[in-house]
């Protein structure tokens, strides 16, 4: 009997659909939330997921992305109240079999279910931001994102995720602080996609790449003839983001003049195109990011303090990778899979030597560097595992990996602390013991073990293989 997981938070609706499908010969399990659905999927094989688009703790789209990664053979049908072509296109691109709108016609549902179960599950199109061309200063276009967001399981990551979930549904302006490559843009997309604005546009602007003299016109638009070269009316990013979210990366790079315009746009919720005299109402949530100290810049008169406070109604700290090393594994798997897909390869994992290097290095370029290194390694790897020869020479050299003069390591060099290598081997040892213990306690039930340890089954399998616990 084919198994279907129905994810729908409207209980009456869920009961009707469940009974209908059961009468038609399917085994149906029902769930109301994304997290709950993930747990159910982790504990048994399903042939099809039917998910509502809006769920209390996320979207059916997120579940789709997750399931395509974790269980690529399982078909997914998305259901929604809205006939939104953008969502439909995105869902199909992400590998959904079909997208149907409420109210559901039973015959149509049954036909779609049968069709999906007799077809091969689709592979998502390009996953990852670098795959899609973007304008030089518009970071990733205004289309809905196809980025798969990995939240991480370390304590720091869980705290960040909790803060994201708290702030997302509000309309507060968020300032994301963090080093380069820590995922600030990914976080801002996450906020957008968890917010009421998720069906509106998300526009990411790299303020550092905006030409100084054109920044105002790029952000707020201009009217024909406003300046030499203004040959036509132009819609600015703020107007284009109406109803959605605008992400201003490297916001500290905006000129003082543009800062004034931005402040006005935030305070009055209107913009005026350059050279124009009409006030245009805008309803845009602003998320800004910086890796500089804006308050310090404010003190030096380079950044307006009033604007700083307007942008900073809530602060999030993107975490440097060296402070979330427990997450290395989950990100490694994600980037490995992404790279395999992009390059049509089937590299299975990393040797223990490579893991040693990964754990010892302090990743100054953070997730971006990690992703690029895995991508390069996958390209160079011909066997089943990435070996240390596929890593760049500087990473491959243990002296380099352990001798960086970054503050985090300077601390570790203090005489009364063990060396990073000692910490790392202690950690590996403890992790191995913990997994062994839980496996014994659950009588080698791997799904249960993974659940208890808060890791997905694939991560558990690769750790078991790494530690020889098979
Ligand atoms: N949560 C995440 N899940 C999966 N991949 C991620 C995540 N965060 C970041 N990445 C990866 O790391 C890369 C860099 O992330 P992002 O562009 O968001 O960083 P950033 O902090 O905005 O960088 P910069 O400061 O240079 O603008 C992304 O292209 C993506 O591949």
Image (spheres, rainbow, N blue to C red):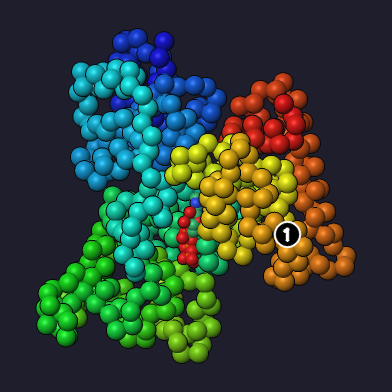
Identify the image quadrant of the C terminus. Answer: top right
| The N terminus lies in quadrant | top left
Q: Residue at x 12, y 77 (%)?
A: 231
Residue closest to the eye, 195 or 339: 339
Determine the residue positioned at 38% across, 38% down.
124
Quarter of the view holding residue 123:
top left
- Looking at the image, can residue 340 be seen? yes
Q: Horizontal and vertical percent for residue 455? A: 61, 38
Residue depicted at 38% across the width and 80% down the height: 254
Q: Residue at x 27, y 33 (%)?
A: 99
Please name the residue that numbered disc 1 is placed on: 397
Q: Quadrant of residue 367?
A: bottom right
Q: Above or below — where is 339 with respect to 231?
A: above
Q: Residue furthest right?
A: 416
Q: Nearer the viewer, residue 25 or 127?
A: 127
Q: Residue 91's spot in the image, x, y percent? A: 31, 39
Residue projecting furthest to the bottom? 301
Counting the numbered discs, the total is: 1
Q: Quarter of the image holding residue 34?
A: top left
Please state the horizontal and vertical placement of residue 330, each as a whole percent of the image: 59, 44
Image coordinates of residue 39 in percent, x first then y, are 52, 31
């Amino acid at each position: 009997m084919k198994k279907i997981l129905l994810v729908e938070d409207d209980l009456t609706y869920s009961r009707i659909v469940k009974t209908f499908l059961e009468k038609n010969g399917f085994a149906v399990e029902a769930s109301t939330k994304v997290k709950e659905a993930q747990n159910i999927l982790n504990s048994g094989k399903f042939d099809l997921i039917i998910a509502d688009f809006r769920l209390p703790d996320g979207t059916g789209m997120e579940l789709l992305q997750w399931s395509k990664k974790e269980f690529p053979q399982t078909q997914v049908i998305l259901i929604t109240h809205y006939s939104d072509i953008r969502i439909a296109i995105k869902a199909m691109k992400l590998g959904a079999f079909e997208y149907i709108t409420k109210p559901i016609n039973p015959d149509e549902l049954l036909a779609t279910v049968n069709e999906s179960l007799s077809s091969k599950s689709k592979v998502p199109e390009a996953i990852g931001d670098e795959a899609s061309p973007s304008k030089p200063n518009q970071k990733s276009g205004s289309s809905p994102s196809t980025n798969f967001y990995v939240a991480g399981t370390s304590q720091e990551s869980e705290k960040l995720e909790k803060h994201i979930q708290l702030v997302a549904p509000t309309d507060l302006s968020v300032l994301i602080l963090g080093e380069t490559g820590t995922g600030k843009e990914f976080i801002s997309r996450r906020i957008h996609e968890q917010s009421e604005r998720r069906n509106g546009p998300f526009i990411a602007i790299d303020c550092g790449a905006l030409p100084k003299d054109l920044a105002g016109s790029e952000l707020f638009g201009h009217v024909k003839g406003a300046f030499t070269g203004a040959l036509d009316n132009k819609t600015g990013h703020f107007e284009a983001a109406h109803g959605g979210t605008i992400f201003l990366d490297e916001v500290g790079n905006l000129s003082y003049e543009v800062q004034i315009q931005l402040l006005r746009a935030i305070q009055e919720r209107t913009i005026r195109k350059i050279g124009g005299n009409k006030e245009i109402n805008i309803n845009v949530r602003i998320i800004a990011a910086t890796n500089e100290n804006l308050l310090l810049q404010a003190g030096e008169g380079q950044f307006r303090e009033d604007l700083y406070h307007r942008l900073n109604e809530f602060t999030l700290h993107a975490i440097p990778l060296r402070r979330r090393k427990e997450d290395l594994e989950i990100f490694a798997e994600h980037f490995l899979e992404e790279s395999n897909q992009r390059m049509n390869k089937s590299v299975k994992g990393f040797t223990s030597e490579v893991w040693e290097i990964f754990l010892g290095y302090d990743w100054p370029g953070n997730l971006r560097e990690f992703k690029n290194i895995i991508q390069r390694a996958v390209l160079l790897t011909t066997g089943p595992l990435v070996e240390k020869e596929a890593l760049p020479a500087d990473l491959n050299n243990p002296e380099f990996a352990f001798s960086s003069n970054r503050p985090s390591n300077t601390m570790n060099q203090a005489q009364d602390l063990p060396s990073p290598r000692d910490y790392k081997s202690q950690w590996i040892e403890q992790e191995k013991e913990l997994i062994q213990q839980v496996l014994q306690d659950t009588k080698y039930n791997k799904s249960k073990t993974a659940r208890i340890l808060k890791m997905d089954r694939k991560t558990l399998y690769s750790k078991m293989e790494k530690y020889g616990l098979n």
